[in-house]
Structures are given as structure tokens and as C-alpha cells.
Amino acid sequence: ATVEVYTVDSPTKKEFVIEEGSGVKLGDIPNVEFALSKIKGDDELLKLIHRSMYRTPGKATVIKKNIRAFSGFPAGFDVKKSEDLFTRAFAATLNMVLDLFDLPRGVGEDGKKEAKVARLMAFMQSPVASGKKDVKAAAEEKREKGKEKRERLTSKKEKLAEKKEKAKAKKAKGKGGTKKGASTSSSKKLPDDTAGIKKELQAMAQRQAELLAKLEKKAAAASPEPSPAKPKQARKAKESGDAPAAKKPKEAKEASEEEPAEKEEPDAPESKMPSDADLELAVKQLLKGADMESISMKKVRGDLEEKLGVPLTDKKAKIKEIVNEIIGA
């Protein structure tokens, strides 16, 4: 028996070939290339464009490559089918295709669907650059400006924060200094212990002695020949710092009688220096019931001299010692 075998030849797959057109390759048009780089390979918009160029939707892996290689419809290509594809597309889709090819959307009559399709077909017949500014360069310039602006803002914020920190530190330091100064001043004015009080009184007494010596020196310089007046009158003259005219009427009368004043010594007992016991008794009597806050060594000694009728400059140390003992008691 004879067996006949029939073989069926499988149709050979047509090789995909991109024929050259009369225009510029889309990949060589900067604005089209920049817009194409922003779209994903599996986008439906690219499938529509690929179909209008090559009659196939194209694979996602090579669809962009094929669109970049398109340079216009080749001779003998059925342009009518491509035009029908765009005519059936939605207005929003047409606008995206126009944007991709850097073509104007149009307004008024140019914004109608038929006019948009006509612009697309004319461009795809022989693609050329629109002549608009380089979108990629403009985007990069915008990005650089944005970066510079952010850097300026960051620098400004850092400087402002640093300035605030310095002001805060300065304010805190000022508050600390004020508190410290206030504490020192308070401790100076109101000592807490007896030793501190004594120290303050000694300083006051020393200052008082210096002022008194200065006053006596000035008084001596003001009166060329001091008259041998009585101790009480001499003390009052020194305190007042004035001429004998400032004396009381009674004292002025006594001072005017020069010869009796020189010869008589009725006040001799007054010039006798009191003993320490008498001095202590007199001080206790003066300080009894006195306001200790307003008392001073100068006032105490002045009152004692007036009471006892003798100058007590030599007894300053003793008076200060007695006052300190009484205050510390």
C-alpha cells in the first residue's frame, strides 16, 4: 500500500520593517523626544499612535523605539485608515497626541476635531520640529531655579534659627546676671550675721572719719586765725562750716567779748575727756529707744559731743566699739 503524506506550508511571518519617510525622525525632534520619555511603554496612547503608523499596536518593549524611528508615511501607505483612527478617537485623546507631537490644540475653528485631525495627518506625512522653545531645557532651567530657591529658603531658615538661638542665649544670660546682681545687692544691704553688720559699721565709721577729716581741713583753710573758742562753740562752728555770724545769739554775744573769753575759764570742766565708763553710759542713754536702722556713727558721736561738751575725735574707736557691743548684745 502506498501512503501519501500531505504537508501544509505554514505562512511565513512578515518581517517588521520601518520604511523611511520624507520628514525628520520623531526621536530627533527634542520636544517630541522629551514628551515621549515621560510616557510608559504600555500606555494605550502609544498603541493608538503605533497603529496609525504601522497598522499594529506594537509591543511594549519596542513601541517607543518604533515611534522614535518614524519619519513620515512611506510612499503607497494607506493614510485614510490612519485618519479614520484619529477621527474615531475622543477629543481628550486627540489633545494628548497633539501635545506629544508638540502641535497646538487650537481655538475656535482650529480647535474643532476635524481641524485637529488635519494637523495631525499633515505632521505625520512629513514630521518637522514646531520651532517652539526647547521644553527639556526649560524644564531643567525651572528645576535648577526651584533648587536654588529651596537652598535660599533653607539657608534663610538656618540663619533665622541661629539668630533666635543667640537671642535666647543672650536673654538667658541677662536674666542670670540680673538675678546674681540683685542677690549680691540684697546681701550687701541686709547682712544676715553679726560679723557682717560689724563690718558694715566699721566701713561706715571709716568713711565718716575720712569725711570729718576733710571737713576739718576745709574749715581750717577757711579761717586763717581760729579764735580760742570754747570746745562746744568750736564743735558747732566746725559742723556748720560757717563764720561766727552763724552762731546763736547767746554764743555770738559770748564770742564778741574776746578778753573775758580768753581770760575766763569757767568751762574748763567741760573740756575734760570723759572716762570709758561715762562714755558707755552716755552711749547707752542715747541708743535707748533709738531707731537702729537710721542710726550712724557720725550722729552718735555728734550727739555725744553735744551732750558732754567736748570733742570726741580721739574716742572714735571706743565709741564704735561700744556701739557694736550694744548692737550685738
Image (spheres, rainbow, N blue to C red):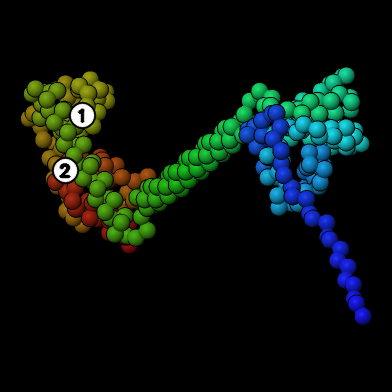
Does residue 31 appear anywhere in the picture? no
Which of the two labelled residues, at mark 2 and mark 1, occupies the earlier sequence position? 1
Task: Identify the residue position indicated by label 1 in the image.
Answer: 237
What element does badge 1 sit on? helix
Q: Is residue 152 above or below residue 182?
A: above
**Residue at the spot 25% in from the left edge and 22% down from the top edge:** 246
Residue 241 as seen in the image, left or right of residue 165: left
The amino acid beneath tag 1 is Ala
Does residue 106 appear anywhere in the picture? yes
- Near-viewer residue (231 or 243): 243
**Residue at the spot 9% in from the left edge and 22% down from the top edge:** 224
Q: Which mark is residue 313?
A: 2
In the rendered view of the protein, which quadrant contains the N terminus? bottom right
Q: Which mark is residue 188?
A: none
Circle 1 residues within 10 Å: few <14, some 14–19, many ≥20: some
**Residue at the spot 90% in from the left edge and 72% down from the top edge:** 4
The picture quadrant where one finds residue 263 is top left
- Near-viewer residue (240 or 13): 13
In the rendered view of the protein, which quadrant contains the C terminus? bottom left
For the image shown, how many numbered marks are present on the structure? Answer: 2
The amino acid beneath tag 2 is Thr
The picture quadrant where one finds residue 88 is top right
Image position, residue 95 (x, y; %) = 82, 32
Image position, residue 10 (x, y; %) = 83, 60
Q: CA distance from mark 2 to mark 1?
A: 15 Å
Image position, residue 219 (x, y; %) = 16, 27
